[in-house]
Image: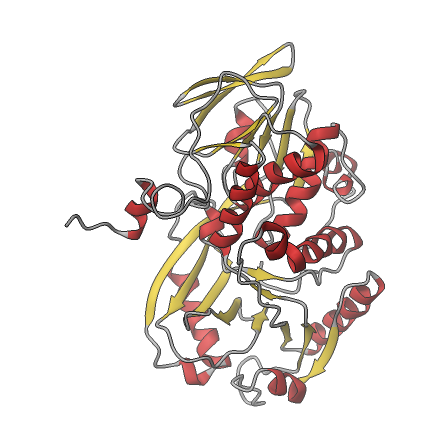
Amino acid sequence: MTKYSLGSLVREGLFGHKRWSPAWRDAAPKAAYDAVVIGGGGHGCATAYYLAKKHGLSNIAIVEKGWIGGGNAGRNTTIIRSNYLYDESAAIYDHAMQLWKGLGRELNFNIMMSHRGVLNLAHDDGEVRQLKRRVEANRLNGVDAEWLDAAQVKEVCPIINISADIRYPVLGATLQRSGGVNRHDAVVWGYARKADEMGVDIIQNCEVTGIKTEGGAVVGIETTRGEIRTPKVASVAAGHTSVIAKMVDLRLPIESHPLQALVSEPIKPVNPCVIMSNAVHAYCSQSDKGELVIGAGIDHQISYTQRGGFDVIEETIGAIVEMFPIFSRLRLMRQWGGIVDVCPDASPIISKTPVKGFYVNGGWGTGGWKATPGSGHVFADLIANDEPNVIAAPFAIERFCSGKLVAEHGAAAVAH
């Protein structure tokens, strides 16, 4: 009997959509579409789904160079939250949060959404003041948030170390009870299946090699499976936004960095929530399989590698063991890296461009997954109407000329 790895099963079409599941059909490219979405991850599939559902566009295609959900969507740590400081950020992330709450029912697909709560820890007096300020800003924007002292943090997460004599003592934390985690590949599959049911073509193993323009407007794309004519191209290729934009001679204020994560061997349930810490550059949750899912801040160097530097992992593991001493003898099962696009103000670009018919959604840094449904929803509005709605408008490219930035670097109160 032929043996397959899980990766080969996906790549060869034996798992996820052909033989093992009728989730969607792998379409052959047509000669022309009304719109093409580049990128078959969470944001790309969500964009196509809302274009079909909300705007009635069915002659559209998702073009993915690998397989659906095989990029950053399958490499993230699945954390969902909307407790951002600034009004513009709170609006888009909480829009996503409201969509997350009913997404499994809407897609008729078990996305394993778990609203288990997210703690953001404070380790010094400055962080305490800053996080309390964020709680009040969240409440003004209708985002659920509360402040907990160290004893209350211990009640929510009994395994955390709140001793006063550690390097970064826990002085308190914010808690967003509606935050939590879900299953990344299930979200992508659910969106892809529903988009397919509404007539969207999903074209896998089809790399975009060029974007054709005439008179400053998009007229089509060139791919490894032939040329496709279309008047609208939407780039949602996480980690490669600048690469796609370069195809129309557009330079974006984006850097690409490795972002690392890892999981432990599976253990019985011990961690009831998500714990995040800016000062120690680490966060942790526990999957339904029992693995501890641990993430770090982005690597400082610019790179397209999917492994990152060992020094980042070493620092993250040291911080996790200090916060959770009971984890010290656990074994590391696997480690990986994604590629994240980062804008100077740590906020995304959701924008039309000087090239008519070319739209960009990227630069999310590490906030992309939690925004998935909200991002796809507002990006679909932009593509269909050629104008951003009120939620997407603050994230237009023009803000880098006007100086009206949405600077969420420190305000996010996490390492990334």
Between residues 88 and 255, which one lies in front from this camera angle?
A: 88
How many numbered circles does the render carry? 0
Q: The C terminus appears in which quarter of the rendering?
A: bottom right
Between residues 364 and 207, which one lies in front from this camera angle?
A: 207
State the residue at coordinates (58%, 39%): 254
Residue 366 position, x and y percent, is 56, 53
State the residue at coordinates (33%, 40%): 13
Residue 285 position, x and y percent, is 51, 71
Relative placement, left or right, of 95 versus 282 is right
Vertical side of 158 occupied by 135: above or below? above
Residue 375 position, x and y percent, is 65, 45
Residue 332 position, x and y percent, is 34, 70
Residue pushed farthest left? 1
Q: Can residue 346 be seen at all in this image of the molecule? A: no
Quarter holding residue 149: bottom right
State the residue at coordinates (77%, 31%): 387
State the residue at coordinates (44%, 57%): 260
Quarter holding residue 255: top right
